[in-house]
Amino acid sequence: MRGLLALASAGVAILFQVAPVLAQDTPSDPILPETRVDDIIVDGRPLEVIAEEFVTTISAPPRRRGLARWSDTVCIGVVNFRNDIAHLIIDRISEVAESLDIRLGEPGCEPNLVIAGTDDASALAEEMVRRYRRPFFRYGYTRSNRGSGALAAFQTTEAPVRWWHMSLPINTIDGSPAIRLPGQGYWVSPCAGSRLGSRSCDAITDHLTRLIIIVDVDQVAGRTVAQLADYLTLVALAQIEPDADYSAFDTVLNLFDPTMQVSGLTDWDLIYLSALYSGEDERLDPREQAARMVPALRAREGD
């Protein structure tokens, strides 16, 4: 493994004791192989049903939590990539984030969204979890993440890109966590573990707080930097299910499916993000997210 990521336990300072990967010349636009396009199948189901299936397929909030989004300032750190590639990734994520009115940190800020390149992703993931299980992978609050099984999969998956989101239920009235964190005396809201749809819990929302993405640079070879940056943008701004079959949908998440041709973020991806970050700061379940998407999808069909 070329890289060892050291994350300071008291903050989000990042140290890589490695030389940048992807230092070789990267083709600006590698040629994709020819792919046979199957016969077109017309889906006659209502758009609302298709949108809800899309949201349910790609979204991965912790159990009994709503879909989380960034609320506080996002500070992006891209490490162990060649400088020009790192800047392209940061610029693309920042461009989409700004269009969603997400606040971005100034240069020199402490990253809470870290993207790390390596040629041994599983070894890096295992070492990171072993050394920094808390607070970077578990808060001591079960529903801040997708659980122990998902954390084990994060360390062992053979996927080209792997990620780990952390989120918290937040009281929208004063912005404080709606649960008691270890060593902190926050009031425990009765809504923190409640099911979605409770009228008494309208003041609770879910916010992303930290995200670690690991890119296996050998497995992403052959894609353009622009394609990879678009893929990382969707993962960076929403809780995406890493193990789903996305092939039924028009999404950048199909980038690593050899049977699909993907150029970048699609209309469905951008509408998903727009719906996620629009409207009131409230607890958001997949059905509500899908309902937010439908008007924009109908407008797209009418173009």
Image: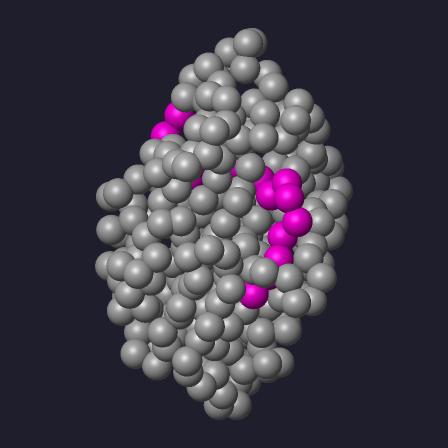
User: Can residue 46 be found in the magenta stretch?
Assistant: no
Q: In the displayed structure, does residue 289 sit left or right of residue 193?
A: right
Judged by its main secondary structure, the magenta piece is loop
Q: Is residue 243 above or below residue 173?
A: below
Displayed quadrant of residue 122: bottom left
Q: Residue at x 64, y 73 (%)?
A: 87
Instruction: Please indicate, yes or no, whether residue 300 appears anywhere in the rendered image.
Output: yes
Using residue 300 as the reference point, say whether residue 56 is left or right of it. left
Q: Can you tell which quarter of the image residue 293 is in?
A: top right
Q: Which residues are magenta?
A: 60-77
Q: Position of residue 194 (x, y in %)?
A: 43, 17
Q: Is residue 180 above or below residue 183?
A: above
Question: Residue 188's x, y, as percent?
Answer: 46, 21
Front residue of 163 and 7: 7
What residue is shown at x 66% (from left), y 49% (from top)?
A: 73
- Give 73 or 186, whichever is nearer the viewer: 186
